[in-house]
Amino acid sequence: MKLAIIPARGGSKRIPGKNIKLFSGKPLINYSIEAAMDSGLFDKVIVSTDSEEIKQLAISLGADVPFVRPESLSNDIVGTRPVTNHAIEFCQKHYFEPEYVCCIYATAPFLEQKYLEAGLRVLEQNNKFDFAFSVTSFPFPVQRALVKAESGLKPMMPEHINKRSQDLDEVYHDAGQFYWGKTAAWLSNKVVFSENSYPVVLPRHLVQDIDTQEDWIRAELMYRAYVHDR
C-alpha cells in the first residue's frame, strides 16, 4: 500500500501564510494535494499540519488530516524527516502498513504525475534503492562558481575556473518536490541523499524553490508561461 504525506506548517517567516497564499489563482498547497489525489497512486493522502485553516482546506480537497501536528514538530527548525515519520507511524497505528511512502512538499506547483510514477517504479523494480527523489541540473557549472572576497570575487574551485563547461561533470540539486521511500527506510537511519537513492531528473523549467518573495514572483511567471504553452 502507498501513502502520501504533505507537510504543511502554518507558520512561514519569509512569505507569511505561504502554503495557502494564492498562487496563480488558488492556494499554493492545492497543487500538491490535487497532484497526489489525481495521480491514483496512493491509498491515502495525509496532510500534516498545525493549522486549522490548512486542515479545512485540505479536507475540502479530499485529503485526510487525521491529527494536529504536535507543537514539537511545528517550529521552523524541525526537518522534514521527523514530520514524515510521525505521519507514517500514525498511519501504521490507525490505518494500514504502507509499503511505500512519498513525502510531497506543499510548495510544488510544477509537480507532474509522470515523475511521481517514475520514482515509485524504480523502488518497485530495483531492490538496490531505498529512496527516489526529484532532482534537476544546475544551469551553470558550479565548479566555476565565484565567492565574495575582501577585494571582490574569487573562484570557489580555482582548479576548474578555466575549464570548458563540456569538460566538467554535470551537477544536480534537490528539486524540492517529492521523496519516495520504502517505509522501513524512512523509519531507519538511512540517509536520503546518498547512493541508496535514485535521482528522478526533472527539466529545469519545472523546478523553482519558493522561499522568498523573489522566488514567488519567478515561480508564478514560470507557471503561467508553462500552462499557456501546453
Image (cartoon, helix red, strand yellow):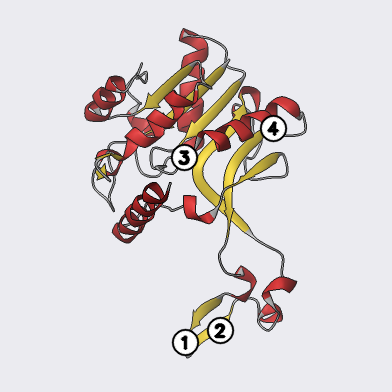
- Residues under labels 2 and 4: Cα distance? 41 Å
Crowdedness near tag 2: few (<14), some (14–19) or many (≥20) residues, C-alpha within 10 Å: some
Amino acid beneath label 3: Leu
Q: Position of residue 51 (x, y in %)?
A: 26, 30
The correct choice, above or below, for 167 with respect to 109 in the image is below
Mark sitting earlier along the chain (3/1): 3
Q: Residues within 10 Å of mark 1 (few under 14, many from 20)?
A: few
Instruction: Work out whether 52 lies above or below 134.
Output: above
Q: Which of the labelled discs sits on residue 122, or is there none?
A: 4
Of tags 3 and 1, the one toward the viewer is 3
Residue at point 41%, 51% (across, down): 229
Q: Position of residue 146 (x, y in %)?
A: 54, 78
Residue 28 lies, in percent from the top left, at 31, 40
Tag 4's secondary structure? Answer: helix
Where does label 3 land, which residue?
111
Is residue 173 depicted above or below 55 in this figure?
A: below
Task: Return the residue found at the far front.
Answer: 229
How far apart marks 3 and 1 lie (CA) works out to 41 Å
Q: Is label 3 in a helix, a strand or a loop?
A: loop
CB contact under 8 Å: marks 3 and 1: no
Q: Secondary structure at mark 2?
A: strand
Disc 1 marks a residue whose amino acid type is: Glu
Going from N to C along the chain, the mark reached first, 4 or 3, is 3
Under mark 4, the amino acid is Val
Is there CB contact under 8 Å for labels 2 and 3? Answer: no
Q: Give the residue number, with chain letter if any, for mark 1.
A: 150
Distance Cα–Cα, label 4 vs label 1: 47 Å
Snapshot quadrant of residue 62: top left
